Image (spheres, rainbow, N blue to C red):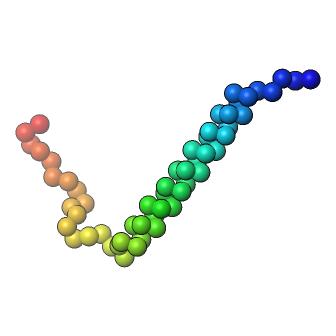
Amino acid sequence: MAKPNYAFEKRQKELAKKKKKEEKRLKKAEEGYSEEHDGTIPANIDPQPATDSNT
């Protein structure tokens, strides 16, 4: 009988948990963004940040 590979099972479980957490985070971020904004870019945000000529 084959010996179970517990390390592989653990890694797969961790990856699944991480993926689910990331999907949940993205869903929350998307919901929060759509509730706060009506889809337009706020006027006070500059689409191209200013460059510093001193560096």
Q: Residue at x 20, y 54 (%)?
A: 49
Q: In the figure, residue 41 lies in which quadrant?
A: bottom left
Q: Residue at x 39, y 67 (%)?
A: 33
Which is nearer the eye, 9 or 46? 9
Q: In the figure, residue 36 lies in which quadrant?
A: bottom left
Residue 34 coordinates in the image, percent (x, y):
42, 71
Q: Residue at x 59, y 51 (%)?
A: 20
Which is nearer the eye, 3 or 23? 3
Residue 9 coordinates in the image, percent (x, y):
72, 34
Asked whether, in this view, residue 26 is left or right of residue 52, the answer is right
Asked whether, in this view, residue 1 is left or right of residue 51, the answer is right
Q: Where 4 falls versus 53 (above or below)?
A: above
Residue 50 coordinates in the image, percent (x, y):
15, 52
Q: Where 12 falls versus 20 (above or below)?
A: above
Q: Residue at x 65, y 33 (%)?
A: 11
Residue 42 coordinates in the image, percent (x, y):
26, 70
Q: Where 40 falls versus 23 (above or below)?
A: below
